[in-house]
Image (spheres, rainbow, N blue to C red):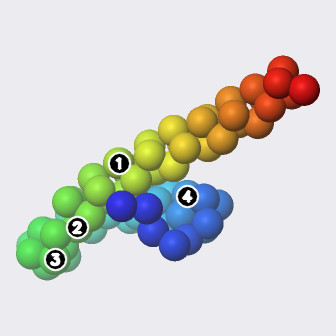
Amino acid sequence: MISTLTDEAFKRLLDNREMTTPRLLASPHYGPLMRAKGAEAELAQMRIEWRERQERARARKLKYEASFGEG
């Protein structure tokens, strides 16, 4: 499922999570809280969504480029 954020905003959010989640999971205090919250699964889902966004962007670019050949 693609969220309503723009690609740029989503990428900033993903980059932030990529930096913070592993450190929080490694923490003896925050690790159990983050696991209980499902932070690992959430990060994995965000990575999947980013790949889907990239695929859609490539498809839009190819469609745009193909439109020049049709004229």
Select label 1 or label 3 by which is in front.
Answer: 1
Q: CA distance from mark 1 to mark 3?
A: 19 Å
* Residue at figure coordinates x 82%, y 24% from the top left: 70
Q: Which mark is residue 37?
A: 3
Is 59 left or right of 52, judged from the image as shown?
right
Mark closest to the chain's N terminus, 4 or 2: 4
Residue at which label 2 appears? 39
Depth check, front residue: 43 or 55: 55
Q: CA distance from mark 3 to mark 4?
A: 22 Å
Dot 1: element: helix
* Residue at figure coordinates x 20%, y 60% from the top left: 41
Residue type of the residue flagged with mark 4: Lys
Q: Residues within 10 Å of mark 2 (few under 14, many from 20)?
A: some
Residue at which label 1 appears? 48
- The quarter of the picture where residue 21 lies is bottom left
Dot 2: element: helix
Name the outermost residue toward the right: 71
Residue type of the residue flagged with mark 1: Ile
Mark closest to the chain's N terminus, 3 or 4: 4
Q: CA distance from mark 4 to mark 1?
A: 12 Å
Mark closest to the chain's N terminus, 4 or 1: 4
Mark closest to the chain's N terminus, 2 or 1: 2
Depth check, front residue: 17 or 32: 17
Q: Which mark is residue 1?
A: none
Whole-percent x, y for residue 37 in the image: 16, 77
